[in-house]
Image: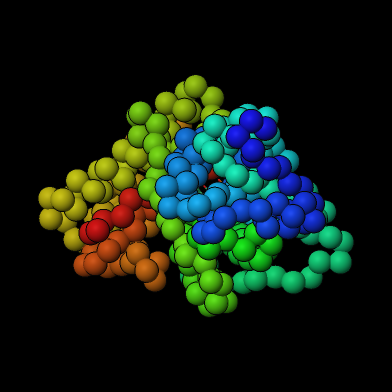
Amino acid sequence: MSKGMILATTLEELRAARGLLGAPLGLVPTMGYLHAGHISLVERARAECASVAVSIFVNPTQFGPKEDLASYPRNLPGDLKLLEDAGVNLVWMPTAEIMYPPDFQTWVNVEGLTSPLEGAMRPGHFRGVTTVVAKLFNAIQPQKAYFGQKDAQQAAVIRRMTHDLNFPIEIVVCPIKREADGLAMSSRNAYLNPAERQAATVLFCALNAAQAAYAAGERNADSLRQAMSDTINAEPLARLQYISCADNDSLEELKTVTGKTLLSMAVYLGKTRLIDNFILGE
Ligand code: AMP
């Protein structure tokens, strides 16, 4: 490729390419079907690192049995074009057999932080995430790794794992990229039909309603949750799965908002499950 972007599939190819890259190396782990949110992580890595690696791997172990692994959107040619244009040095695209050979039996599990929120709704999800990210860290050995605030709990869990397992890697969490109408960019937005796509702005509206209440002085967490659920429930195409007003570090539900607070939610639009969040008190 023209700017010298190296493509690797096997571990041998990865290791050979890894040796050619200058330090510090920044890693952006993804599941592909890339959008401007992913590219914002690449750009941050580009700005802070001598070289940038991106992994594309739809990780089967983080999907539940009834989730969308089989239908997860894929567009490898489009992804590679975006990454080449963004100046990425190395793309690793391992197969499921490379990551999980038949005799695979080692898992990485973060305990407390994975219990609430996404962890409660998606049993086993974070065990899959932390296992694959630990494998990516070991295989690629970056100095920095970039994650999105879009997946707030995931970022907190990865930070915990990185610290607890002494990976010498700095975790950088980047802001949520949104469409013009406020919808957080997500590969799963591709599932939405036009009516659902329009209705999907309700997550952003709900977060704004709670933020407005907070700005007006509301500190009762139930009132903030109520402001969010009222907004979601007013949209006929939306079905609320959970709503949360939690301490940003422990992720424990709050009675009263004092310090840095994570407002988050999961909402179904038809069969598509979307998540979004704001931080209060930054
Ligand atoms: P995924 O391909 O969905 O696993 O996402 C790969 C990385 O991109 C994760 O760290 C996500 O949090 C991040 N990401 C996804 N969507 C966005 C977004 N809209 N803004 C910023 N980062 C994002």
Residue closest to the eye, 218 or 113: 113
Q: Position of residue 42 (x, y in %)?
A: 50, 44
Q: Position of residue 168 (x, y in %)?
A: 53, 71
Residue closest to the eye, 192 or 102: 102
Q: Is residue 31 visible?
A: no
Q: What is the number of callouts on the image? A: 0
Q: Residue furthest top?
A: 194
At 40% across and 31% down in the image, what residue appears? 179
Which part of the image, by quadrant, shows the C terminus? bottom left
Which corner quadrant of the image does residue 5 belong to?
top right
Which corner quadrant of the image does residue 12 belong to?
bottom right
| 253 left or right, relative to 96 | left
What colour scheme governs how the chains and residues are painted in the rendered image of this protein? rainbow
Q: Position of residue 140 (x, y in %)?
A: 65, 59
The answer to whether 78 is drawn above or below residue 90 in the figure is: above
Residue closest to the eye, 47 or 66: 47
Which corner quadrant of the image does residue 23 belong to?
bottom right
Residue closest to the eye, 267 or 108: 108
| 84 left or right, relative to 226 | right
At 57% across and 42% down in the image, what residue appears? 88
